[in-house]
Image: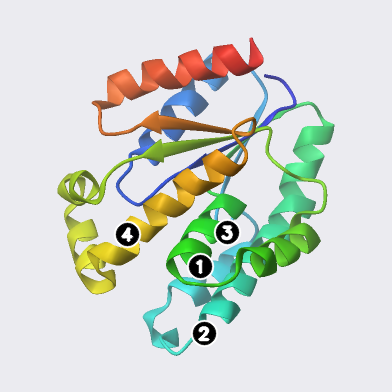
């Protein structure tokens, strides 16, 4: 797995962050060099952009502006952290990446996929993941796991979250060689076992 770029992604409430933390701990326990990044953020510039994106005062922000801000944060992350880490032969673990933009602003928000990908190619250049692990979960299960999620789902609506989930699954169908879909409805230990099995199958 050395020198590999692996993205964890999926709908809110999928448990991906739990699995991310577990794999990160396992790698570090084995003294395997790993670079951990999150989106949006992960750099000084990216954290400033994150503040803008998450500040409710900017409720008038257009979907296209939102998408471009995510990509701007991503461009800085690629140049400052991801590409240098890969050049050093480290594993890069990312909590979200372009796959999130395709699901949220694309499939659910309605921005054209080709428009998103055009900006993504400019932002990411050659920094594309070797594997995107999608933690798949239905809306009801996701909502039951985290009480704040109930408010977000109520605000966005169940149909929005259904489209997000389908957006992730559609990405996996379009490019199965680069994507793995794991059933995240199961308990976290079972998901971890499936994750490790998938990584062994892909990378040995």
Q: Which residue is mark 2?
A: 62
Disc 1 or 3, which lies upstream in sequence? 3
Between residue 144 and residue 31, name the one nearer to us: 144
Q: Residue at x 32, y 57 (%)?
A: 162
Mark 1 vs mark 3, foreground winner is 1
Q: Label 1: state its secondary structure.
A: helix
Q: Is there a contact, CB below 8 Å, between mark 4 and mark 3?
A: no
> Which residue of the protein is positioned furthest toward the top in this rendering?
204
**Quadrant of the image occupied by residue 178:** top right
Instruction: Pick whichever, 120 or 48, lies toward us.
Output: 120
The mark lying in front, picked from 2 and 3, is: 2
Relative side of 130 to 201, left or right: right
Q: What residue does disc 4 label? A: 161
Whichever of callouts 4 and 2 sits on the residue coming sooner in the sequence is: 2
Relative to residue 49, is residue 56 depicted above or below? below
Q: Secondary structure at mark 3?
A: loop
For the residues labelled 2 and 3, the Cα–Cα distance comes to 20 Å
Residue 164 is situated, as x and y percent measured from the top left of the image, at 40, 57
């Amino acid at each position: 797995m050395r020198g590999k770029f692996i993205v964890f992604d999926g709908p809110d409430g999928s448990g991906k962050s739990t699995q991310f933390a577990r794999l990160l701990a396992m790698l570090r326990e084995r003294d395997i060099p790993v670079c951990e990044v999150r989106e949006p953020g992960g750099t000084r510039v990216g954290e400033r952009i994150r503040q803008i994106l998450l500040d409710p005062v900017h409720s008038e922000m257009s979907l296209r502006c939102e998408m471009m801000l995510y990509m701007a944060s991503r461009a800085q992350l690629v140049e400052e952290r991801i590409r240098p880490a890969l050049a050093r032969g480290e594993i890069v673990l990312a909590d979200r990446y372009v796959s999130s933009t395709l699901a949220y602003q694309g499939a659910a928000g309605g921005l054209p996929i080709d428009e998103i990908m055009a900006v993504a190619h400019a932002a990411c250049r050659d920094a594309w993941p070797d594997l995107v692990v999608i933690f798949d979960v239905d809306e009801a299960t996701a909502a039951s796991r985290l009480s704040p999620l109930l408010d977000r789902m109520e605000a966005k609506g169940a149909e929005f979250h259904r489209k997000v989930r389908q957006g992730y699954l559609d990405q996996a169908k379009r490019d199965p060689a680069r994507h793995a879909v794991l059933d995240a409805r199961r308990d976290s230990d079972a998901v971890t076992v499936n994750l490790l099995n998938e990584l062994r199958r892909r990378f040995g």
